[in-house]
Amino acid sequence: MNVASWVWAATLVGLIGMLAVDLLIIGRRPHEPSIRESTIWVSIYVTMAVLFGLGIYLTSGAEYAGQFAAGWLTEYSLSVDNLFVFVIIMSRFMVPREYQQKVLLIGIVLALVMRGAFIAAGAALVNEFVWVFYIFGVFLLYTAVRLFRHGEDDPTDFKENALVRWSRKVLPISKDYDRSRVTTRNSAGRLIFTPLLIVMIAIGTTDLIFALDSIPAIFGLTQEPYLVFTANVFALMGLRQLYFLLGGLLDRLIYLSIGLAMVLGFIGVKLVMEALHGNNVPFINGGQPLTGVPEIPIWLSLTVIVSTLAVTTILSLMSSRRQRRLSARAAGASPPSSADQSSADVPISR
């Protein structure tokens, strides 16, 4: 896939323009977006991704369009899983809802920068060393096992990393937030940081961990740097609005981690198979490619990704609905406590 320099330039200009719009909205009026506002923005970004995929189809063919679609869906799903951690961090640090937009936007910008760096490094490695697919594949299989186990753990079990703990000890931090500012002045007039800086550090380090997971995943679906980059961009754009749109729905997607584990495991196997197909590692088959290893076509990858995510989402919502009904039924059928019974026997004074 040959991408002209002006296409890269136009893409970057468009990205900067979208970020500028977000910055202007937040800078002008920090607030908690309504459901209507969030729905409109999420719909705009999803429509833009679909139109971009259609443009890839018209200009470069169905193969590359399928690679973009599979990569975007995978990265978008990983981004939704990332929102779980964002929700926990916001709750842990008690960030006011009207200021969470700024934190999310900065987190998205950091994620774009880090993923851009990883994409450039990954593309260079893939072009020079075929054996890197072995590393990517094994790493994704490890990530799949970790995600599967995470689905069985308590999702609220969040532990501060070393950088966050170090920042708490070293930096002068105020006890309270000062609107959406990162710095403020104490009673002595000294310039200090607000807790918002610690939240941003926590979000940034979380972005780094998710970037390490997501980049090998998309390289398992396409090795085109332009498609890898744009799929990540469209997966991250609108994440801020999606955070407020989903709201309480996030805790109902109880099987999302399991679905993502299956997807990443599938991509990990696909990467190992591609590495075997183009093998040049001396201690595997004498450094010769294994021509008998089948290649997984992109249409099959796309089918597996869509069906797995759809089934796990549907099962999650069905299970959550059933659990709520059972809880409501148990609460309605529970006998009154002794305290309630005794208070009911006491006459009301007039």
Image (cartoon, rainbow, N blue to C red):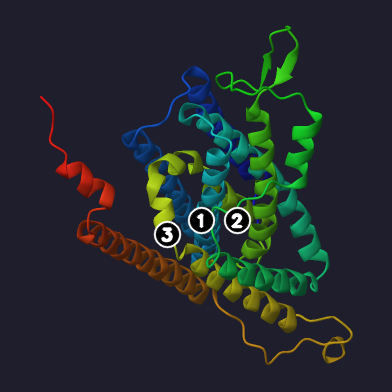
N-terminal-most mark, 2 or 1: 1
Q: Quadrant of the N terminus?
A: bottom right
User: How many dots with numbers?
Assistant: 3
Q: Quadrant of the C terminus?
A: top left
Q: Which residue is mark 3?
A: 253
Query: Where is 185 relative to 296, above or below?
Result: above
Q: Position of residue 31 (x, y in %)?
A: 44, 25
Q: Position of residue 35 (x, y in %)?
A: 33, 37
Query: Where is 24 relative to 333, above or below?
Result: above
N-terminal-most mark, 3 or 2: 2
Instruction: Left or right? Give the position of 158 relative to 169.
Output: left
Which amino acid lies under the numbered mark 3 shown in the image of this protein?
Leu
N-terminal-most mark, 1 or 3: 1
Q: Which residue is mark 1?
A: 56
Q: Which residue is mark 2?
A: 227
Q: Nearer the viewer, residue 162 or 308?
A: 162
The answer for how far apart the CA atoms under marks 2 and 1 are is 9 Å
Determine whether the residue tagged by mark 3 lies in a helix, strand or loop: loop
Query: Where is 186 relative to 107, above or below?
Result: above
State the mark number for residue 269.
none
> Which residue is drawn at the image coordinates 48% and 23% (left, top)?
30
The answer for how far apart the CA atoms under marks 3 and 2 are is 28 Å
Q: Position of residue 208 (x, y in %)?
A: 70, 49
Q: Residues within 10 Å of mark 1 (few under 14, many from 20)?
A: many
Which amino acid lies under the numbered mark 1 shown in the image of this protein?
Ile
The answer for how far apart the CA atoms under marks 1 and 3 are is 31 Å
> Which residue is drawn at the image coordinates 46% and 31% (left, top)?
97
